[in-house]
Image (spheres, grey):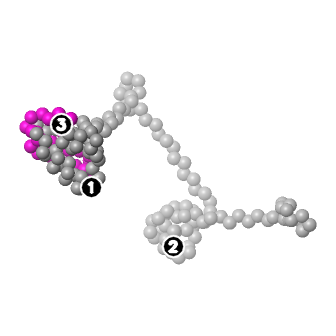
Amino acid sequence: MKHTYHIEGMTCSGCEAKVKKDLSNAENVTEVEVFKEDKKVSIIMSKHVEIEVLQNALGGKESKYQISLPINNSKEVVQKSCCSTGEKEHKHHEIKHTHQAGKYYCPMHCEGDKIYDKAGDCPVCGMDLVKEPEVIQSTKYTCPMHPEIIQ
């Protein structure tokens, strides 16, 4: 019979080999496959072996390697229905496209320093055009007698 268990504590291929060797030495175990990335171990046994026996083969409860029953990570998606019609409940979200006026350029500078008036894609490479930062000039006035006053 084949059983799959969850195993924690393996960090390298050496750990993987040690777990395989230790579990293979357990009584009634005929074959062991260890999957470090998935944190799983598949054990083929001639008779059922209790999980405590397998844990003892790994070094007991104080061991770096802890074996347990498989963890079920599958999450079933339950779709809601509207009333009893069987129609799926869903919402459409409006996407607001904001095209701000300004100057745009290609970040790859395909056509040199060419500037475009609208947002969009570069006609040469297809990348999104990037808006040039706007230079905001403001005039500030100060009094020569009171420089801390700025208007």
Residue 76 position, x and y percent, is 32, 34
Residue 92 lies left or right of residue 8; in this view the side is right
Q: Give the range drawn in magenta.
A: 28-54
Whether residue 64 is visible: yes
Q: Nearer the viewer, mark 3 or mark 1?
A: 3
Q: Residue 120 or 33: which is nearer the viewer?
A: 33
Q: How far apart are marks 2 and 1 (CA)?
A: 47 Å
* Residue to which mark 2 is pinned: 109
Amino acid identity at mark 2: His
Q: Is residue 37 above or below residue 72?
A: below
Residue 125 position, x and y percent, is 44, 69
Q: Looking at the image, is mark 3 or mark 2 earlier in the sequence?
A: 3
Q: Which of marks 2 and 1 is in front?
A: 1
* Residue visible at 55% across and 68% down in the picture: 105
* Residue to which mark 3 is pinned: 53
Question: Judging from the image, what secondary structure is the residue with disc 1 in?
Answer: loop
* Residue visible at 35% across and 32% down in the picture: 78
Q: Nearer the viewer, mark 3 or mark 2?
A: 3
Q: Does the segment drawn in magenta span residue 59? A: no
* Residue visible at 33% across and 36% down in the picture: 75
